[in-house]
Amino acid sequence: MAPLDRIPTENPPPTSTAWMNPARAIAIVAVVAIHSLGTVVEQNFADMGPDWWLANIVDSACRWSVPVFIMISGALALDPDRGSKPRKFLSKRIWRIGIPLVFWTVVYVLFRRYYLQPDDNSWNPGIAILTGSPFVQLYFLYVLAGLTLLTPFFRLLSVHGSRRLQWGTGLIFLGIGMLDQWVSMVFDVGEANIATRFLPMAGFYILGWVLRDIVLSARGALIAWATLLGSCAATAVWAGLGPGERPWLFPYEYLAPGVVVASMAAYLLMHFHLREGFGLLHRFYPYSFGVFLLHPLILYPVRNLMGLPASVPGVALHAFVMPLAYALVCALITWAAVKIPGVRSVFGEGGPRNPHTRTRAPKPGRAGTAPPEHQDSPLRRDSVD
């Protein structure tokens, strides 16, 4: 515990959170890229040709995206200046997380049953829901739901806990999550379910707040870039040359050592680089939750029509072009959907206040915290009061 003794007891001065908008816009495209390449990594591994290595490298380089989303959620939710009574906080979460969770679980159970696996009688949708991961991306909502329930208690750390206590708690939770991941993956002991899936991610949630107001120096940014690139490279090498028939399974996990280090570095680097400008990304980010929810409904049918790539140019298309195309189409659908009163609640836009009455955002980089629209939906609203 000696390193913790050198941590100041007081938190650093608050900084603008406007950088989180473009960060989430970039991260959601990285998430789509992971899903665009997942089957390519699985199916093309036998040959381990240049096409597989390209898919593996891009996939490894995008793995920071989900932890960064969770860190941003914690950075906003645990802010003591945005506190409210637990009952009020949780009642809003029902609209912003609970309704989308229930609706899209039903949609993707039907999508999987009647489109992806119509002849697979071994798949049980009830069991899939009880695992807390009924479809490829929906586990994130189940993680957010669990973290939301504990947020009023975690917020006591930022309100009453010293800086050292916050660091210590975040690192302990992260260490427990990493150990749980290692034990379950390597030794096949235990399995996450609907009640526990969020717990391993709690460390990211707390450390998002702890790291929120740290602004790197130029030298620190260079070190962070070296750390990020080195961690992604280590993940890619391990994924290709590690032990087991499918060596990528463990290093790709969000609590694997390389991904944890890369996520911390990416979080700090985004704060460093995205403090000013990036107006286009600021306009895109309000639809990031819709992109998250919708993209498999477009990605899987399109990829089935195109077929899996077996060449470097084909993999490059699925790695760099198609994720942007999927994100743009889903953003346009979301833009139209949230204008429909009966539909917008399933995109996290319903609830007690009008989601279209928004304060004009200040220019990124201004001092102070972000305006209300910067925390408005489960990939943007998951963390506000």
Image (cartoon, helix red, strand yellow):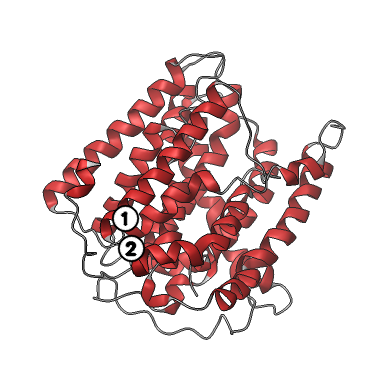
Query: Can residue 10 be seen in the rendering of this structure?
Result: yes
Between 343 and 87, the one lying in front of the other is 87
* Side of 38 relative to 1 (left or right): right
Q: What's the residue at 13%, 51% (across, down)?
A: 218
Quarter where residue 79 is shown: bottom left
* Side of 98 relative to 286 (left or right): right
Query: Can residue 64 be seen in the rendering of this structure?
Result: no
Between 13 and 16, the one lying in front of the other is 13
Residue with the mark numbered 2: 161
Residue 232, position as x, y percentages in the image: 35, 33
- Quarter containing the N terminus: top left
Q: Amino acid at mark 2?
A: Gly
Q: Residues within 10 Å of mark 1 (few under 14, many from 20)?
A: some
Identify the disc placed on residue 165.
1
Q: Residues within 10 Å of mark 2 (few under 14, many from 20)?
A: some
Q: CA gap, disc 1 to disc 2?
A: 6 Å
